[in-house]
Image (spheres, rainbow, N blue to C red):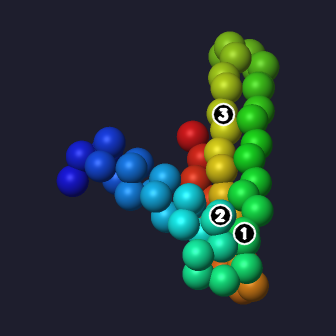
Amino acid sequence: MTVLRIAVILAAGFALAGCGADGEPVQPTASVGVGVGSSGTHVGGGIGFRRGGFGLYLGV
């Protein structure tokens, strides 16, 4: 599977969970961070959601 195909499948899953088609709507969470250190700067971020005892978070 290519990375693009996996990204599309994950986006479709988030869209389905977010619209409430399978029950209560799930509010996604997002975060972005910038770090500065002795080796330079770096940028990271991620998106995720939590429902009951299950949580999923994808970050870069």
Q: Is residue 24 above or below residue 50?
A: below
- In the image, residue 27 sits, relative to residue 54, either above or below, namely above
Disc 1 to disc 2: CB gap under 8 Å:
yes
52 up-or-down from 46: above or below: below
Question: Visible in this render: residue 34?
Answer: yes
x and y percent of residue 48 in the render? 66, 58
Which callout, 3 or 2, points at the residue further toward the start of the chain?
Answer: 2
Distance (Cα) linking label 1 and label 3: 23 Å
Q: Find residue 11 and report its horizontal and vertical position in percent.
A: 49, 53
Which is nearer the eye, 44 or 39? 44
> For the residue marked with disc 3, what is the amino acid?
Gly
Q: Which amino acid type is marked by label 2?
A: Gly
Residue situated furthest left in the rendering: 1
Q: CA distance from mark 3 to mark 2?
A: 23 Å
Q: Is residue 35 left or right of residue 5?
A: right
Residue tagged by mark 3?
44
**Label 1 belongs to which residue?**
26
Where residue 42 appears, as percent x and y from the top left, is 66, 23
14 displayed left or right of 26: left
Whether the residues at callouts 3 and 2 have beta carbons within 8 Å, the answer is no
Q: Secondary structure at mark 1?
A: loop
Residue at 78%, 19% (x, y): give it: 36
Q: Which residue is mark 2?
A: 18
Q: Give, as a three-letter code, the residue at label 1.
A: Val
Element assignment for label 3: strand
Which type of secondary structure does the marked residue at label 2 adopt? helix
Q: Nearer the viewer, residue 27 or 21?
A: 21
Mark 1 neighbour density, 10 Å: few (under 14) some (14–19) many (20 or more): some
Distance from Cα at disc 1 to Cα at disc 2: 5 Å
First of labels 1, 3 by sequence position: 1
